[in-house]
Amino acid sequence: MSWIAIIALAAGTYAFRVAGPVLRDRISVSEQVKRYLTLAAVALLAALIGTAALLDGTHFVGIARPAGVLVGAVLAWRKAPFVVVVVAAALTAALLRVAGVE
């Protein structure tokens, strides 16, 4: 039964991927709808980042991880190189954990 579900999901995913280029010229979307879709994507990404940064399952992770995410977000906003963003965020969280701040 699980192979049938996997094949059905794979076929559905492929159909959605093909539908974009095939239907691009046939369907027109207003500028307002495009704007709302962009805003919805940003809101979804922010929600994913928020839940990943603040929760482990259903439990609050403490201060160290959100502080690291905040440092990384500020550096990314300031257009720091990606490696610097990742290392600074990880270092911030690690140092706070070593200092006993959970």
Image: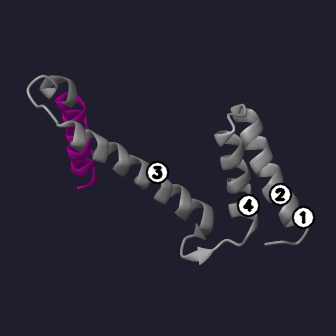
| Amino acid at pointer 3 | Leu
In space, the residues marked 3 and 1 are separated at their CA atoms by 30 Å
Disc 3 and disc 4: Cα gap in Å? 18 Å
Q: CA distance from mark 4 to mark 2?
A: 10 Å
Q: Secondary structure at mark 2?
A: helix
Label 2 Cα crowd, 10 Å radius (few <14 / some 14-19 / many 20+) = some
Q: Which comes sooner in the sequence, label 3 or label 1?
A: 3
Q: Are marks 1 and 2 in contact (CB under 8 Å)?
A: yes
Write the residue at 85% across / 63% down. 96
Q: Viewed as shown, does residue 40 lie left or right of 65? A: left
Q: Which residue in the protein does label 4 denote? A: 67
In the rendered image, which quarter is residue 57 located in?
bottom right
Left or right placement of residue 36 versus residue 47 in this view: left
Q: Identify the residue position indicated by label 2 in the image.
A: 94
- Residue bearing mark 1: 98
Q: In the rendered structure, are the residues bearing label 4 and label 1 in contact, judged by CB atoms less than 8 Å apart?
A: no
Looking at the picture, does residue 48 appear above or below residue 72? below
Pair 4/2: label in front = 4
Q: Reply above or below: 18 against 3.
A: above
The residues bearing labels 4 and 1 have C-alpha atoms spaced at a distance of 14 Å
Q: Position of residue 62 (x, y in %)?
A: 71, 72
For marks 4 and 2, the one nearer the N-term is: 4
Picture residue at 26% right of the left edge, 39% below the top: 34
Q: In the picture, which quadrant includes the C terminus?
A: bottom right
Q: Earlier in the sequence, mark 3 or mark 4?
A: 3
**Which numbered marker is on residue 45?**
3
